[in-house]
Image (cartoon, rainbow, N blue to C red):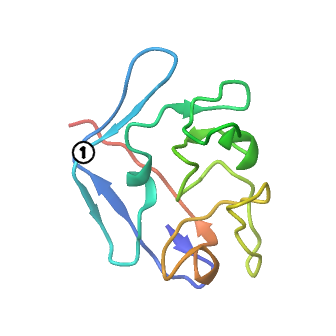
Amino acid sequence: MTNHKNDTGYETFREFKLTDGIKYKLNIGLREASDNIAKGLWYSNLAAFSTFDRDLDFGGSRNCAVDRHGAWWYKTCTYVNFNGLYVQPGETCKLAGAETGVCAQWHGGFNSGGKLRRSSMMLRRT
């Protein structure tokens, strides 16, 4: 990931798999991350893939896919959301409401460096 200040961060996992069936539950193994990544995708471990029409998160009565503007592996709701609305540099990631953007919690929190300029997920078969 690269934020609007050109700081970079990463998370890697020894295992990354999805369960079969309609829930596509995320199962990720041991985590290695750069010092500036607080929780990232690791927070979503064991979460099912929630969509606008299939609320599978642990967010209580709200649907995190609706609140966060995109389908993802939500728990209560998330610390990383690559499928949300894009946030322009200088805008604030408002994760408590419906104005959530493509953000990650790092460099002291969402509002002090979490607006992402670039992100990628890469998978490698082992």
83 horizontally vs 88: left or right: left
- For residue 17, what is the image quadrant? top left
Give, as a three-letter code, the residue at label 1.
Answer: Gly
Measuring from the top left, give residue 16's x and y in whole percent: 31, 39
Is residue 51 depicted above or below 83 in this figure?
above
> Residue 93 sits in which quadrant?
bottom right
Kindly identify which residue carries mark 1: 29
Q: Where residue 102 appears, x then y in whole percent? A: 65, 60
Looking at the image, is 77 positioned above or below residue 79?
A: above
Q: Residue at x 53, y 72 (%)?
A: 2
Quick one: SS at disc 1? loop
The residue closer to the viewer here, 126 or 10, is: 10
Label 1, residues with CA under 10 Å away: few <14, some 14-19, many ≥20: few
> Furthest residue to the front?
61
What residue is drawn where x is 40% and y is 17%?
Answer: 20
Left or right for 1, reference 28: right
Position of residue 49 measured from the top left corner of the image (x, y, whole percent): 54, 32
| Residue 100 point in image, percent of width and height | 72, 59
Residue at 64% x, 72% y is 115
